[in-house]
Amino acid sequence: MTSTNKILIQALLTFSKDYSQYHIEQFGHLPIVEHDEEWLSPCELGSHDTNHNYWQGVEIKNEQLSDTKEEALTFANVESALNIKLHPDIKIYFTTIFSGDIEAKCDEGDLSLLFAWNKEDFERLQENIIGHILMKQRLKQDETIFFAVTDEEDMIISVDNNNGEVWVERVGCKPHKKISDSLVEFIRQLTPNSVISEKQ
């Protein structure tokens, strides 16, 4: 693992913990999620009430997945299906933590960082990424991989697959505004946000 990968992993773990701490300071407890027996996650902790559980992002330990006979999380099938190599940063981003969406803000405004909630969600995420890249190829645009949504409809934040730069783009359009040279740099400039409404 390269030092750049380690730096990105640490930035993601740190921001996830900062978000949990910020939420505790704002609401007096960790974020909550509606409990669904059919959609369990290692992120879930104790009960908030009869219908909701507390949650926080947890580091994905691929060796633990191997212990349970589950395959480690990789993008090998996506790369094989599309016959391309995904930028290492985006692979690290989506295989570092299981988490709910993390609300954040940057100089450009409010956003939600997207993560996989569980192994099944990771598979669904891969399908969405394949669909996004196929759309880009069909439109003859450079490939990007989304990792966040903004509070503006149809506006997403993505990584340029060629160079790892972070851009804002409207779905179906070319990226129109570069906001960071790298994913590490982008994550480090974020601050936790509390725009979500608490379902008490």
Image (tube, grey):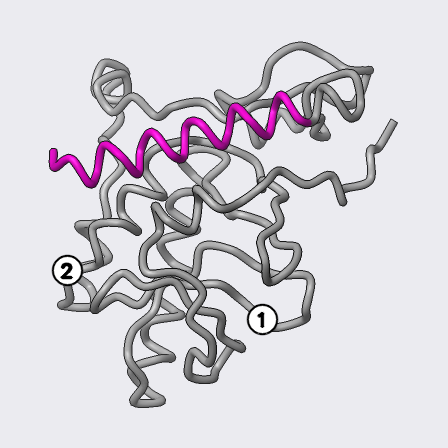
Could you say whether the residue bearing mark 1 is in a helix, strand or loop? strand
- Residue type, mark 1 in image: Met
Q: Residue at x 46, y 81 (%)?
A: 176
Does the magenta run of residues contain 129?
A: no
* First in residue order: circle 2 vs circle 1: 2
Q: Do tag 2 and tag 1 residues touch (Cβ < 8 Å)? A: no
Q: Which sits in the foreground, 42 or 99?
A: 99
From the image, which quarter does the C terminus lie in?
A: top right
Whether residue 18 is visible here, answered yes or no, is: yes
Q: Residue lying furthest right in this view?
A: 200
Q: Is residue 65 above or below residue 178?
A: above
From the image, which quarter does the N terminus lie in?
A: top left
Residue at which label 2 appears: 80
Q: Which disc number belongs to residue 155?
A: 1
Q: Position of residue 99 (x, y in %)?
A: 51, 33
Q: Residue lying furthest top in this view?
A: 46
Could you say whether the residue bearing mark 2 is in a helix, strand or loop? helix
Q: Which sits in the foreground, 42 or 181?
A: 181
Magenta range is: 1-22
Q: Which disc number belongs to residue 186?
A: none
- Residue type, mark 2 in image: Ser
Q: Residue at x 59, y 50 (%)?
A: 112
